[in-house]
């Protein structure tokens, strides 16, 4: 058990299980930094794609009005610039971070890793793979 876990366990009456679940990122601050960078870059990329879609819809619905067309084209343009900056920053952080600090952003960008993190935060380790609510049946 690390120093962080020991100190936190003393604060919660010695309950190390609660502390280990609360420290869902692990006990390594570098791992927390790695995870936050990876997820923030994923969120930035998703927001760029959403704004490209919003700009496209507003372009279609502009009705030929010059000011609305200009606004929607600018939305698309700046969203694409944001997406390019996000991809470049991901590349730079991956290359420089791996060389200098041992950061590995790729390992956090998977559905299974994100699902495990959500389950660790919520404290739920069971997954209902049946697609329905518990107790539901077709009989």
Image (cartoon, rainbow, N blue to C red):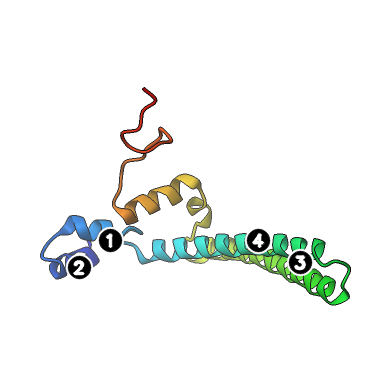
Cα gap from disc 1 to disc 3, whole angstroms: 40 Å
Instruction: Determine which residue is flagged by label 1.
Output: 22
Quarter where residue 32 is shown: bottom left
Label 3: element kind: helix
Cα gap from disc 1 to disc 2, whole angstroms: 10 Å
Quarter where residue 11 is shown: bottom left
Horizontally, is 38 left or right of 120 in the view? Answer: right
Marks 2, 3: nearer the viewer = 3
Q: Is residue 1 visible?
A: no
Instruction: Work out whether residue 133 or residue 22 is closer to the camera in this orientation and state it.
Output: 133
Instruction: Determine which residue is flagged by label 4.
Output: 50
Residue 59 x %, y %: 80, 65
Instruction: Determine which residue is flagged by label 3.
Output: 76
Which residue occupies the extreme front position in the image? 139
Label 4: element kind: helix
Residue 117 x %, y %: 39, 53
Horizontally, is 2 left or right of 25 in the view? Answer: left
For the residues labelled 1 and 2, say whether their Cβ atoms are less than 8 Å apart: yes
Which residue occupies the extreme top position in the image? 139
Q: Residue at x 48, y 53 (%)?
A: 108
């Amino acid at each position: 058990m690390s120093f962080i876990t020991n100190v936190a366990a003393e604060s919660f009456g010695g309950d190390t299980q609660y502390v280990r679940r609360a420290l869902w990122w692990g006990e390594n601050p570098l791992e927390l930094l790695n995870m936050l960078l990876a997820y923030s870059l994923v969120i930035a990329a998703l927001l760029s794609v959403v704004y490209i879609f919003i700009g496209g819809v507003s372009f279609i619905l502009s009705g030929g009005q010059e000011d609305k067309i200009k606004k929607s084209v600018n939305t698309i343009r700046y969203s694409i610039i944001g997406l390019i900056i996000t991809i470049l920053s991901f590349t730079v952080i991956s290359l420089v971070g791996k060389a200098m600090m041992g950061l590995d952003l790729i390992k956090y960008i998977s559905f299974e890793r994100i699902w495990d993190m959500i389950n660790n935060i919520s404290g739920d380790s069971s997954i209902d793979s049946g697609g329905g609510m518990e107790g539901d049946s077709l009989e």
